[in-house]
Image (tube, coloured by chain):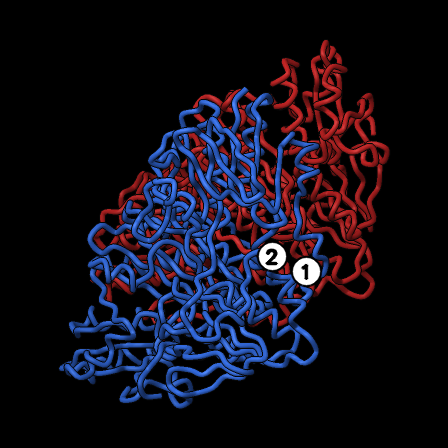
Chain colours: A red, B blue
Amino acid sequence: MATTVIVGGVAGGMSTAARLRRRDEQMEIIVLEASGHVSFANCGLPYHVSGVIPERQSLLLQTPESLRARFNLDVRVNTRATAIDRAANTVTTDTGETIAYDHLVLSPGATPVIPPIPGIERALHLRTVEDVDAIKAALTPEVKSIAIIGGGFIGLEMAENLRHRDLEVTVIERAPQIMAPLDEEMAAIVEKHLAGHGVQILTGAGTKTIAGDALELADGRTVPADLVIASIGVRPASELAAEAGLEVGERGGIKVDDQQRTSDPAIFALGDAAEKADAVSGEDTLVPLAQTANRHGRLVADIITGRDVRRTTTLGTAIVGLFGMAAASVGWNERRARAAGKNIRAIHVHPADHAGYYPGAETLHLKLVVDADTNAILGAQGVGMAGVDKRIDVIATAMRGGLNATDLADLELAYAPQFGSAKDPVNFLGYVNDNMVAGERTVQWHELEEMVADGWMLVDVRTPGEFAKSTIPGAVNIPVDEMRERVEELRDSRALVFCRVGLRGHVAVTLLENHGVEAANLDGGFMTWEYAPHDQG
Amino acid sequence: MATTVIVGGVAGGMSTAARLRRRDEQMEIIVLEASGHVSFANCGLPYHVSGVIPERQSLLLQTPESLRARFNLDVRVNTRATAIDRAANTVTTDTGETIAYDHLVLSPGATPVIPPIPGIERALHLRTVEDVDAIKAALTPEVKSIAIIGGGFIGLEMAENLRHRDLEVTVIERAPQIMAPLDEEMAAIVEKHLAGHGVQILTGAGTKTIAGDALELADGRTVPADLVIASIGVRPASELAAEAGLEVGERGGIKVDDQQRTSDPAIFALGDAAEKADAVSGEDTLVPLAQTANRHGRLVADIITGRDVRRTTTLGTAIVGLFGMAAASVGWNERRARAAGKNIRAIHVHPADHAGYYPGAETLHLKLVVDADTNAILGAQGVGMAGVDKRIDVIATAMRGGLNATDLADLELAYAPQFGSAKDPVNFLGYVNDNMVAGERTVQWHELEEMVADGWMLVDVRTPGEFAKSTIPGAVNIPVDEMRERVEELRDSRALVFCRVGLRGHVAVTLLENHGVEAANLDGGFMTWEYAPHDQG
């Protein structure tokens, strides 16, 4: 009888185990889990801190007992695998056992990064059910202020949930922006929203020391911190693999082939501990997401039981909900694409999530990053109060299906006024891209200043009322509906046109170009420009 | 100077006109609209009847004046094109004009089908702003009961909005089910929901006469009807084209090529009046949807202005919102696929729209129709209180991208507990399909009776508590978690297994098959079976 030993009993490990049993009733399947719980809802942990998820029990999806009953699994919690003897095909544990395996599956997950900050040992983390218990226990009535080090997904989810408990919350992020998967002008929308809900965000802020009930920052400021939560990020838990001589990549992930096999063919790895293949570049990458772990768990079980299947590459689709706002991304952002030397088109649109004439429509901020040489979709980002998840999922699916950026214009998405628009926001991205392919010039918010310096005239084509309220410094106002009769005013200019979101600007640019005036449209309009970070207000 | 005349100024016609102007500043563009309004929000009309959309004004997205100012369009409302002289390249109107064209674009839309029922002249319709005005005017305080003939999208939207006005509403549908794009067991979920909101639904019900304040049905029943609304469907408004000798298809749609050209190369047609190419079969079809009209309007403008672009085929993605529930479909349903002689797989799943451990999760009913010979996705349907639009849009995008049914398992969809699950409902469809490809047998609700008659043993693998509450008549109860030790009880049987939604059934079937017992799983479980129509309760 064959034995498979699985190290790690949360998303990937438990998917492997359950699928193995469904495909092989005879196999001995042993799961070793270092924490006290298996198959828990790790993505739900922050919400139990606030009580949004009131019952701790509802985070515990399975127990060793329930898994024994249903799948005849031998699940051992509080059991850490400490060494692999590849010659003997055995694993030893901190409970003193040595277990022989035919196949070994490594799915130990990731461990929180601990930065070398004096006092960091005071900081709590959030990774396991035990971590939640510790944070809840630490939130005594005396605790008023919390400092969260790290403005990533989990740090921000913690910020929301601690605000629900009426605590003073400061997020300290070393980078110039929170939420690294987003570009800065998209992250800025989230920052503003968080600030509106009382979360203080400090970006570009290094933590120097943690002492007493405060953090001292590198720039000398102090942050009140009765409690400190460190959420800097995670690194693959690949020590066990490395010590066993398995190949480990530059970023610390266990190297695997497209069947999740490590450099030892009897050993598989998956989940946060293993490398993935990036969908855009094909290169090795780390993507610590539960859904990828689940899919790869199923794959590994199929392969162990004799099915010749291969993994797909990884898009890294991710989303976070923050005080009712969603922020999501898929693929590459502009920063990453530019760093990789790609010739790109960036497209920002701000349509309503559903038909504006139907009550409750919310502005949806979408950004598409396109390879200008191939028209391939490199990635997308979305921020807004409704409909973000749908559009990012649609674009993720389009990317998987090999559709290009113009194809988005022709997607047939379900339309009734509660759910979308006859021209869906995703179609809009495709339309803008198609216009650019056909030669229309757009300008990014960060290119504006240089173009103005170069002599382009800034033309605000919104109404006089909109112009009077607020505009980009230096702009003149020629409303789009007057442009046809006033085109001669721009006869000898190069016109850098903008409106609120880019649509009227597009109309104005086509009109000007048709009249022989060189023109370009500010992509995303005043709205993208206004959200984006500027040196001067 | 070239002139383009456009017949019809709503979705398709107005998209053509605006795009033409953006691409050609010199062209004369004349739009003839038979009703008093252009560019109105036709999909919003039912919601103004109830006051959900309170302002009539908000339905009127543009006026002839606003379109003149922005796009220099010559828009003539209350002007019906009455004849085309193709030899002279002119259109005449009911206002007595004869207008010469270089290109003519026909986008007149569709007209309501009027069944030959005595008294039908009393019935109101809903197609234009004037129709809404007429319905609102007819809703005097004396009107208490409304009969709606036709259980399609618009009829049901009207039913909801009239219920919001506390009227007694009966929907009379001649077919055995409402909502033809759905299969009957999916439509049944919607029927139950509507009934729960006080809409009386009569299916298989022909209307014999409309007289006094009641309808008499073919079976002798009478339906109170202070007001009658006929919403049987629409037919293409192709008379003008037909009279001009343009080719018209069997179903009355104007024939066009893949550039929307009619049989006269100077004349284009699009929108509800024109045929489309079905995405599944490639055959000519009618799809009266605003989004398709908009896309084809843009396409026609590009072609007229010299761009060599082609339409894509049409999936017919559609959705309706009814008392908070969404019902949506894309591509073909099972009925249509079977009628076309396809060898199909049908897959029903009922997962939560987002992680069950996060508050507010709602059951999502999804159905996938797969070509069993090619693994191609033929279509999908979704019904539920949340997340339906997203999943149908994802599947529509997958179909457009040429992904097959198993590929759905690997889609990377954004997951946080508010938005989805680590295994998204769409992934689930892919998993079930993959299991079937690998040989697992499932049984449709309508096949169950015959299999039981053929000697299959019905095995309810839910808990004794679930079994005691309600089960399928004749079933024995062997909970999945006891199956391993009780497998011998089924040794000489063929086991037709079911659970609540199909998941535990899948586990039980794999277990039984691994133990050498022939087994099949009831697709969609007890839930699909219970919703589906049965002769006996």
Q: Where is residue A240 in the image (x, y as percent from the top left)?
A: 43, 46
Say which amino acid is labelled 2: Gly
Q: Residue at left 67%, top 64%?
A: B52
Q: Tell whether label 2 touches label 1 (CB within 8 Å).
A: yes
Relative side of B321 to A247, left or right? right
| Image: A326 above or below A79 | above
Q: Residue at left 45%, top 83%?
A: B216
1 or 2: tag closer to the N-terminus? 2
Q: Residue at left 60%, top 40%?
A: A366
Q: Where is residue B275 in the image (x, y as percent from the top left)?
A: 37, 46
Question: What residue is shown with label 2?
Answer: B44
Q: Is mark 1 on a helix, strand or loop?
A: loop
How far is mark 1 from mark 2, CA to CA?
A: 8 Å
Say which amino acid is labelled 1: Ile
Furthest toward the front, the residue is B96
Question: What residue is shown with label 1?
Answer: B53
Q: Is mark 2 on a helix, strand or loop?
A: helix
Where on the picture, by quarter, is residue B260? top left
